[in-house]
Amino acid sequence: MTHISTPCIGICSTGIGGDVCRGCKRFAHEVVAWNGYSEEEKAVVMERLSSLAAQVIADKINVVNAQLLQEQLDQRGIEVSHPGGDTQRVLALLRAAAGQLDIPENFGLKLSSEMAALSPLRMRDRIDTDFYELSEAHYERYIKV
């Protein structure tokens, strides 16, 4: 198994008492214990994050040309540090270059009518909020005692 680096994006809210990080969407105990996790434990966390992100993005953004999306990421020097296919590519693009996403088709993307009505930055924020809320719901249902 390859080394799995932290999904941290430098916007941590767990230090101020949050159960779910607003940045990477990991649970507070995962943020604290990350460096002690085995690669298998890290992979489980990454799979959950990828799955939740895919649920959020599925009805909002459709990747119709994965090669074009990857070319646009490469052209902008945006790296996708974690596996997860198209979902992780879309998240990386939104985090790093949402302001450049004025013509989604140029990135190999097709937006839902709901997303197409939003500015690229509002679209990014909406997806981030939905991802955070889904992570919180997952925590409340399966983790919190």
Image (tube, rainbow, N blue to C red):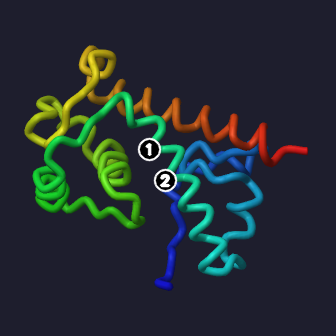
**Amino acid bearing label 1:** Ala
Query: Image height check: is 18 above or below 44?
Result: above
**Residue lying at 28% horizontally and 23% vertically, measured from the top left:** 112
**Residue lying at 38% horizontally and 66% vertically, measured from the top left:** 81
Q: Is the Cβ of the residue at disc 2 closer than 8 Å to that at disc 1?
A: yes
Query: Image height check: is 84 above or below 64?
Result: below
Q: Quadrant of the C terminus?
A: top right
Residue matched to label 1: 54
- Give SS at disc 2: helix
Q: Nearer the viewer, residue 20 or 68?
A: 68
The picture quadrant where one finds residue 109 is: top left
Disc 1 crowd, CA 10 A, few/some/many (<14, 14-19, 20+):
many
Tell me: 34 left or right of 57: right
**Amino acid bearing label 2:** Ser
Label 2 vs label 1: CA separation?
6 Å
Q: Residue 75, position in %: x, y? A: 11, 59
The picture quadrant where one finds residue 133 is: top right
Q: Nearer the viewer, residue 145 or 124?
A: 145
Query: Image height check: is 122 above or below 16?
Result: above
Q: Residue 3, position in %: x, y? A: 50, 82
- Give SS at disc 1: helix
Q: Residue 144, position in %: x, y? A: 84, 44
Residue matched to label 2: 50
Q: Nearer the viewer, residue 108 or 8?
A: 108
Query: Image height check: is 4 above or below 27?
Result: below
**Residue lying at 54% horizontally and 47% vertically, measured from the top left:** 23
**Residue lying at 75% horizontally and 45% vertically, measured from the top left:** 19
Disc 2 crowd, CA 10 A, few/some/many (<14, 14-19, 20+):
some
Residue farthest along the bottom direction in this orientation:
1
